[in-house]
Every structure is written in C-alpha cells, then in structure tokens.
Image: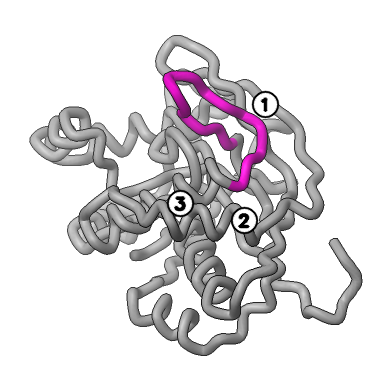
Amino acid sequence: MKQYVLTCAKTIQRTDRKLAVFLNGWLMKHLDSDLVDKFHQTGDNPFSVYIDEQPTTVKLVFNALDAEMETIFDELLLNPNLKKFEFVSASQKEFVILDHNARVLTEKDLSKQFYLGKSTGWYDLKIVSPMTFKSQGHYQFIPDVRLFFQSLMRKYNQAIENNEQIDVELLDEICKRTQITNYRLRTQRCFIHGGFVTGFLGYLTFRCYGSQTLKDYLGALLSFGEFSGVGAKASLGLGAIQLKNQKEENNGKA
C-alpha cells in the first residue's frame, strides 16, 4: 500500500466540499477505460482519495491499496510533468503542486506492529473527511463501534486477502471490549452524484479493554485505515482518518 500526498497552493479561503469528487473525476479520466469499467461493475475500488485542507495549502491525498494501483499511481502522480490540477467546476480552478510525498505500508509492517505487542489500547483519531456507513439500505452518520470496525475489517480483508468476509466472532469481541471514550464531532453534508450524503468529522477516541493481542490487532487495523478510509464512499473522499499518538496506559483518560 502506498499513500501519495500532493501539497498544493491554496488561493481561496475555503475549498469546495465537492473537491474530492472532482479529484476522483480527474483520476477516472487518467485511468484506462477498461479498469474504470471494472471498478463500476464490481464496486471494488482498490484506492481511496481525500482532501486535507490546511490554512494556506490543500493536500490532495491518493491511496493505492494493491500493487497494480501502486504502479499506476507511481506513473501518474510522481510524474515530473504533473505540475498542477485543473478543475473546471471548482471555485479554485487551478491547484499548483508545491510538494510531492509518498509513504509505504506493507503487510510486513502491519505484522511487525501486531507482533511487537506494544499497543496501549488507546486510539486517538482525527476524522479528516466526513464519515458515513451504509447499513440496511440507509446511510448512518453516528459514530458506532460496530459499524466502524466492521467496515475497516472488510476493507482490510479485501485488500490483503481479496475476500470481504469477516470474522463475526472477532467483531463481536471488538464490540464487547472497545468503547468510544471521547469525541468532538460535527456533521457535514457532501454533494455526491446528484444527491447529499451526511457524515461526521472531527476527533474520536477509542479504548480497548481486551487482551494485548486484541489491542495490537486494532492498532494494526487502524494503521491500515489511514490508507483505506472507513465507511462508505472512500474513493470519493469520505471517511479519511489519521491515527494520532496512542496514549500511555498511566495517563489520564481522554
């Protein structure tokens, strides 16, 4: 897995909420049409994108979840001829690239994190872009332990094992042993495909009271989540997370 962060100049006070959708559209235009058709037919998008807005810059973030997308993104996003992005329908129509960065997360990295046994069980997250879950035919935009980790487990299994089936008993154990201990969230509506989707974003803290093995599993899973996103529409900019430093067990509660 590989994350590409393209930092661009910001010329307006606040960027469009649809900017991630425009970014997805730009990407689709630059991918092979057969690959785009495959994504549409299977619903399997081995990538995610999101916007991380800063006071004076905008970070356009692309995540490749498999080797094929890594190769494609390497050629497309690390191309020295790529100097800017242009979006006809956006308020800021031109985004000049100031800097390129990339970081890699391998299965070996995740295994090492799991087997080191150092997770404290505290997980501070920044929900960078609105998060929502598709459940029973409807979008749910309330933070929920089960929906959160169910989504993340499915994405992990799809990316690593090419199978969306999850261990329901393990999910039940996560729900039994994990709580949301703190949050500062707000809702935001996103315009996607002719309609609005509501999600939540801000800051969220989980605490796991389970075994060390379970704590380490969640730590590795959340590290993966920085690449995959969580919830619905990650390929259109929703559900991006950043994992903050884990709290020490002897610190005060979140």
Depth-wise, is mark 2 or mark 3 nearer the camera?
2
Where is residue 243 drawn, in percent x and y? 62, 62
Q: Amino acid at mark 2?
A: Lys
Label 1: which residue?
188
In the image, farthest residue toward the bottom:
116
Q: Residue at x 50, y 46 (%)?
A: 230
Name the element at disc 1: strand
Q: How is the image coloured?
A: one colour
What's the distance in space between the residues labelled 1 and 2, CA to CA?
Answer: 29 Å
Label 2: which residue?
176
Quick check: 2 above or below 249? above
Q: Amino acid at mark 1?
A: Gln
State the extent of the magenta-drawn residues as a range. 131-145
Quick check: 52 above or below 169? above
Mark 3 nearby-residue class (10 Å; few <14, some 14–19, many ≥20): many
Question: Contact (CB < 8 A) between labels 2 and 3?
Answer: no
Q: Nearer the viewer, residue 167 or 112?
A: 167
Q: Residue at x 73, y 56 (%)?
A: 205
Q: Nearer the viewer, residue 23 or 113?
A: 113
Quick check: 168 above or below 147? below
Q: Amino acid at mark 3?
A: Leu
Label 3: which residue?
152
What's the distance in space between the residues labelled 2 and 3, CA to CA?
Answer: 17 Å
Is 12 left, or right, of 131 in this rendering?
right
What's the distance in space between the residues labelled 3 and 1, CA to CA?
Answer: 21 Å
Pick the quarter of the image with the N terminus.
bottom left
Is 11 left, or right, of 38 in this rendering?
right
Q: Nearer the viewer, residue 210 or 164?
A: 210
Depth-wise, is mark 3 or mark 1 nearer the camera?
3
Q: Would residue 177 be seen by someone viewing this image from the given angle?
A: yes
